[in-house]
Image (cartoon, rainbow, N blue to C red):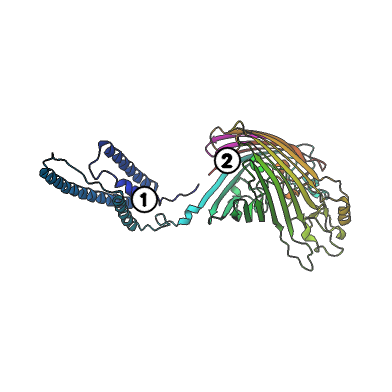
Amino acid sequence: MKTKTTAWILPWLMAAVCSAPVLPAAAGERESLEDMRATTMSLIELLVQEGVLSKEKADALLKQAQQARLKAQQEAAAQAEVQKDNTAQTDKASNKPGAIRVQYVPEHVKNEMRAEIEQEVMKKLNYKAGERLGIPEWIDRVEWTGDIRLRYQLDQFADSNALPGVLSSSEVRNAVVNNSTEDRERQRIRALFGANLKINDWLTGGIRFTTGLLQTPVTPNQTEGFSQGKFIFGLDRAFLEAKPTPWLSLVGGRFANPFFTGNARLGTDLLWDPDLAFDGFAANFHPQLNQHWKLFSTVGAFPIEEIESSDTNKARDKWLYAAQGGIEWVANNQSSVKLGVAYYDFKNVEGQSNPVGNSLKYAGTVPLWRQKGNNTFSVDAANGNNCGANLTNPCGLASKFQLINVTGEIDLAMFDPVHVLLHGAYVKNIGFDAQEIFRRTGNRYKEENEGYEFALKVGHPVMKQLHDWQVFGGYRRLEADAMLDGFSDSNFRLGGTDAKGYFVGGQYGLGKNAWLTARYFSTDEISGLPFSVDTLLVDFSGRF
């Protein structure tokens, strides 16, 4: 929703109000001009009703226009009388029949009259160039955006699941789980409110606030219950984006996932939670080769956790360095094929063991945020502390994470507006090295470092209007150390890795920018302790 300036309309109104016939004219011309004048009067009344013009300013505008029109009519009548007398004298001298002639008013005279009236009205309205009735011009460079989503969520747990205490105390997987046996129903809400900013021709920006718990980076959902007080509203986006050329963009701050993953159109992703924000810097290159072919590539550096290293704290800052390249082909009917290959290198995220007698040296290597699934170990085993059993000594990650990710999509648009979308993705953590893990942790782990996903969607690409629809379904398998579990989809097996299962769903447009979504996930563990959960999500969303 964007505020539009009305600076252009005032000169038009002045010209239209003054355009009723001031000189004799044909009946059809007079009728057309009177219609235009009547329409303009109605428009001024509408502007008053909408609050764009005050009643006093509108009255002043109309009064000024009427005075100018009356003056023009009087001057035209006087000119007509003079011309009539001159013509009669000429005809009498030449013995010709008398005739009435009206002097034509040149267009430049009309324009000068309109300009004088406009200046006078603007002066009375205290109207300045670049402003709209006292409102600064920058308001026209702000686009307000947002949406509200109401959700019903049902989590159903298998009877064979391990107990929460067993899952949380396991040193091998150390799952962050509070409930694994009792079905749970929740009413949840998500609210987003932001602004897209156009700073100049080459620089834009954005700010967005969202609900959600401040300690989690992956979900903006807030469980409803008025006894808990006010909902939390935090800054979720704050960035500047420069576009020095049509094929290059540079973005810095906190922004949406800059990589091609497919989650924008499917609402799910093999690696990343769809609501995860990226901090740091990214550069995107997208040269257009010709009408049908386009290349794209993205490189970026993203801080995960800043650590104040010292003589007693030898942990290092945690970063993600990433690059992706790909190609896209678009047919004449807007069908497309898109393929991307990405490399994600997570630095300093693996745990390091403390030496005997020093429980702080590498305590900072444990992750600040986790869900569940990754293989773990106690960073303070040398001092007799087991992770999971001692909450003050969390687990470190056993593996390093260097991911190769391939993502592809085929979008068939020959039935437009209905599209058929085929999606597939694969990931392998080439940083997993069993021998290196054994040297660093003293533990041996099975190599579980791959994942894949495929999905099909049929329907309208985006829910915009009444009766828009789509249905989708797919299957996913994400092994324990295929991805950092803290940043994966928070809905699929309630977040984390070591997960496999299918998902189905659909969407239906209930009106303009309003739609209903239903999704169902049926998921199980791959190799860890038993933890199966089926999740039903029913969302009612409104966007502005």
Q: Are marks 2 and 1 in contact (CB under 8 Å)?
A: no
> Quick check: is 139 in the magenta stretch?
no
Residue holding disc 1: 10
Task: Determine which quarter of the picture holds residue 523.
Answer: top right
Residue type, numbered disc 1: Leu
Residue type, numbered disc 2: Ser
Magenta-colored segment: predominant secondary structure: strand
| Residues at marks 2 and 1, CA–CA distance in whole angstroms | 39 Å
| Callout 2 secondary element | strand
Identity of the residue drawn at 47% across and 49% down: 3
**In this rendering, is residue 246 above or below 99?**
below
Identity of the residue drawn at 84% across and 57% down: 385
Residue holding disc 2: 541
Question: 149 or 458: nearer the eye?
Answer: 458
Residue 514 picture location, percent across and down: 55, 38
Q: Which residues are magenta?
A: 503-517
Give the side of residue 12 with respect to residue 261, left or right: left
| Callout 1 secondary element | helix
Residue 366 picture location, percent across and down: 77, 56
**In this rendering, is residue 467 above or below 269?**
above
Question: 449 or 177: nearer the eye?
Answer: 449
Residue 235 picture location, percent across and down: 60, 54
Question: 280 or 383: nearer the eye?
Answer: 280
Identity of the residue drawn at 30% across and 43% down: 37
> Quick check: is 505 in the magenta stretch?
yes
